[in-house]
Each structure stands twice: as C-alpha cells, then as structure tokens.
C-alpha cells in the first residue's frame, strides 16, 4: 500500500474512534437486561390470558387512567418535596461546614412527609386497582379470568391472608395489581394490540 493510503486509513480509524459511542456502564447494561427480563415475566402472565384486540383496547383505557393518576400524584409529591428542599440543603450545608447534625424537627417533618406519601400512594393504588379490576371482570370471559387467576403464585397476592382462604377474586385482584398495574404493561399491551390488529 502507498503511504497516503495508510495515512487515509489511519485518519479514518481515528475519526471512527472519535465518533464512537461511549460504552454504557455495567449498572446501565444490567438495568437494561433486567427490564427485558421483567417484560418477559409480564408477557408470561399476560399471553396465556389470550386477550383479543377489542379486549386489549378496553383494558388500555383504565390502565392509562391509572398511569395518569400516578403521574399526578408524583407531581404533587415533587411539589411537597421542593417545599422542603431549602431546609434539607441548609441542614446538609451545616453538617458539612459546622459538623451540625440535622435537627430533630427537620427529621420528624421528613418522616411525616414520607409517611403521608406512603398513605396517599396506597390509597391511589387501591382506587386505581379497583377500577382496573372492575374493567377486567367486565371485559374478560370466565376462561380468561381463570387463566389470569392461576398465573401468579397465590402467595404474591395474599397480603397477609391465609392462602387457603383466598378467593378467585383475591387472586384476580393480585394479577391486576402485580401484572396489569406494572409500569411496563401499558406498552406491552399496546404492542400486543398492534401485532393482533
């Protein structure tokens, strides 16, 4: 090869290296793979129910409403956290510069705030689960409800109840909460609808 050709190839190789995308860190790569595994697990719970396109469409609406309720709650929680941010920043600054521990009042206020978040979130999840559950009972036929009921390990939906006393509705409600209310499920159902339409 001629020297110019070597030079041109060397310049191209360097340029290619300059424009190469940085490799994602292991935690990012692991998260990406874990998301795929979760998607596969959700599909394992959804596909056996054999949802038809019209059923998928009918289920997407209450699930989207639940997603909107979650986003609204997140926005409200963010505003309440922002209201505390200056106090937290001041406490961090005082801890770093003056070796002062955060005040008991601040810590108590933070605990109270996060407890309020927990209770409010539990109420929102319960309300939205009830709505999606009602849609599932209406949209799915008996065989599909049975497939959904039997797709999860009963202990997942037990929530402290005696496993031998779980009703089919208890198990179906657990399927709604664990499977249909999962943040990834909406897009999975949309994908299934697209494939079946």
Image: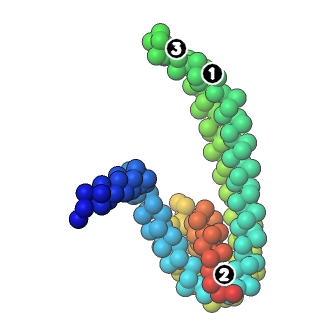
Please name whichever residue, 156 or 54, is drawn nearer the observer in this view of the structure.
54
Asked whether disc 2 touches disc 1, contact meaning CB atoms under 8 Å apart, the reply is no
Of all residues, the one furthest to the top in this rendering is 98
Task: Please state which of the two labelled residues, at mark 2 or mark 1, is closer to the viewer.
Answer: 2
Return the disc, 3 or 2, that comes first in the chain's sequence: 3
How much space separates mark 3 and mark 2, taking CA atoms? 55 Å
* Residue hosting label 2: 194
Q: Position of residue 132 (x, y in %)?
A: 72, 69
Mark 1 nearby-residue class (10 Å; few <14, some 14–19, many ≥20):
few
Please name whichever residue, 19 or 174, is drawn nearer the observer in this view of the structure.
19
Task: Please state which of the two labelled residues, at mark 3 or mark 2, is closer to the viewer.
Answer: 2
* Residue hosting label 3: 94
Mark on residue 156? none
Q: Position of residue 56 (x, y in %)?
A: 70, 80
**Element on which disc 3 rests:** helix
Q: Quadrant of the N terminus?
A: bottom left
């Amino acid at each position: 090869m001629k020297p110019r050709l070597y030079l041109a190839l060397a310049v191209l190789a360097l340029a290619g290296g300059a424009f190469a995308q940085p490799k994602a860190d292991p935690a990012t790569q692991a998260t990406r793979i874990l998301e795929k595994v979760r998607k596969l697990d959700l599909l394992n719970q959804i596909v056996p129910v054999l949802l038809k396109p019209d059923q998928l469409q009918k289920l997407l609406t209450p699930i989207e409403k639940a997603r909107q309720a979650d986003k609204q709650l997140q926005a409200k929680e963010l505003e309440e956290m922002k209201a505390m941010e200056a106090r937290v920043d001041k406490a961090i600054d005082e801890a770093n510069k003056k070796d002062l521990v955060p005040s008991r009042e601040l810590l108590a206020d933070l605990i109270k705030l996060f407890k309020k978040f927990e209770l409010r979130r539990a109420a929102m999840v319960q309300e939205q689960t009830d709505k999606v559950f009602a849609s599932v009972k209406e949209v799915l036929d008996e065989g599909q409800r049975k497939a959904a009921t039997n797709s999860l390990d009963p202990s997942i939906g037990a929530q402290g109840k005696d496993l031998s006393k779980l009703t089919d509705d208890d198990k179906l409600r657990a399927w709604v909460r664990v499977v249909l209310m999962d943040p990834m499920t909406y897009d999975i159902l949309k994908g299934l609808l697209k494939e079946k339409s």
